[in-house]
Image (tube, rainbow, N blue to C red):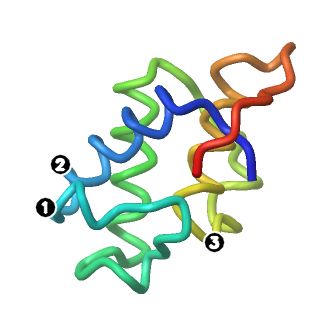
Amino acid sequence: MTFNAETFTKVCAVIAGELQCPLTELTPETTAEDVDGWDSLAHARLIMALEDHLNIRFPGEKLFDLDCVGALVSLADQALSPDEEVTHDVA
């Protein structure tokens, strides 16, 4: 999975703030099941917070198919630069 490291940092900061979880526990592989309180309602609030914080709009048809933080970051990257392919790998 490829995405921009800066986007990863921003997305994780929003997730940690919204879900009151330690930032250090978030990795690209983290799923909603790994974070206490990340249910469907929290997911919807998280998406709105990310859109506001990053000044983007996610495509609605993809929002509930995300299986991990890395997939969310990749989608954010696509929304931030829809005309450019993201090529930065974060390990």
Element carrying mark 3: loop
Whole-percent x, y for residue 84 in the image: 84, 16
Determine which of the numbered discs, if any, sits on residue 1 in the image: none
Q: Are the residues tagged 2 and 1 within 8 Å (C-beta)?
A: yes
Crowd rating for badge 3 (residues with CA inside 10 Å; few <14, some 14–19, many 20+): some
Q: Quadrant of residue 42?
A: bottom left
First of labels 1, 3 by sequence position: 1
Whole-percent x, y for residue 9 in the image: 38, 36
Q: CA distance from mark 3 to mark 2?
A: 20 Å
Write the residue at 42% across / 85% down: 33
Element carrying mark 2: helix
Q: Nearer the viewer, residue 3 or 58?
A: 3
Q: Which residue is mark 1?
A: 20
Q: Which residue is mark 3?
A: 67
Whole-percent x, y for residue 74 in the image: 67, 43
Amino acid beneath label 3: Asp
Q: Are the residues tagged 1 and 3 within 8 Å (C-beta)?
A: no
Whole-percent x, y for residue 37 in the image: 24, 78
Determine which of the numbered discs, if any, sits on residue 17 in the image: 2
Q: Is residue 74 above or below residue 1?
A: above
Amino acid beneath label 2: Gly
Element carrying mark 1: loop
Crowd rating for badge 2 (residues with CA inside 10 Å; few <14, some 14–19, many 20+): some
Q: Horizontally, is 75 left or right of 38 in the view? A: right
Q: Nearer the viewer, residue 50 or 60?
A: 50
Amino acid beneath label 1: Gln
Write the residue at 35% across / 62% down: 26
Write the residue at 70% across / 67% down: 65
Write the residue at 44% across / 23% down: 54
